[in-house]
Image: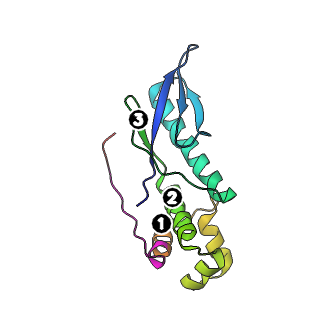
Amino acid sequence: MHNFVYPIALIDDPDGGFLVACRDLPEVITQAENRPQALEEAEGALQAAIEMRIQDGTEIPAASRPRRGELLVAVPIGTAMKAALYLAMREQGVSKSELARRLGVNEKEARRMLDPRHSTKVPALEHALHILGKRAELRVNGV
């Protein structure tokens, strides 16, 4: 099971505001003037880091348990779905062309499913995950 909700540290910046960091994804570093903005910036930085790892074909680390003082920030749903598909394909050694064959679509469409610049509908990603024996679940928490 993959969870795309990562612990984020908000560090008081001596010059004011907050520095934002994620120990699971060291490339996630940003800053903000206040706490709400810091959480919004963290979500954007997480999204960019996950998308970059998909594009580069590198590993996406599992989210660790939060430590004292860390906050949990979720990757946007569309990005999380693409990451789940990417990880399922890696786990099973399924190429984009093989995914396309299994889905009965052309390879260009399968490539777009993993392209962060292309908006893929959730039902299409859900179907692709199902073809790979996976199921997406959504959990809604309070802010």
Residue at mark 3 to residue at mark 2: CA–CA distance: 21 Å
* Residue highlighted by disc 1: 122
Amino acid type, label 2? Gly
Q: Residue at x 56, y 13 (%)?
A: 14
Q: Residue at x 50, y 23 (%)?
A: 11
Residue at mark 1 to residue at mark 3: CA–CA distance: 27 Å
Q: Give the x, y percent position of residue 2.
A: 44, 58
* Residue highlighted by disc 2: 78
Which callout, 1 or 2, points at the residue further toward the start of the chain?
Answer: 2
Q: Residue at x 47, y 72 (%)?
A: 129
The crowd level at tag 3 (other Cα within 10 Å; few <14, some 14-19, many 20+) is some
Main secondary structure found in the magenta portion? loop
The crowd level at tag 1 (other Cα within 10 Å; few <14, some 14-19, many 20+) is some
* Residue highlighted by disc 3: 71
Q: Residue at x 55, y 15 (%)?
A: 16
Which callout, 3 or 2, points at the residue further toward the start of the chain?
Answer: 3
Amino acid type, label 1? Val
Q: Give the x, y percent position of residue 103.
A: 55, 82
Which callout, 1 or 3, points at the residue further toward the start of the chain?
Answer: 3
Q: Where are the magenta residues, as a range?
A: 129-140
Q: On the rendered structure, is 139 left or right of 39? A: left
Q: Do the numbered discs 1 and 2 sit on residues whose CB atoms are within 8 Å?
A: yes
Amino acid type, label 3? Leu
Q: Describe the element under mark 3 as helix, strand or loop.
A: strand
**Residue nearest the viewer, comparing 130 with 36:** 130
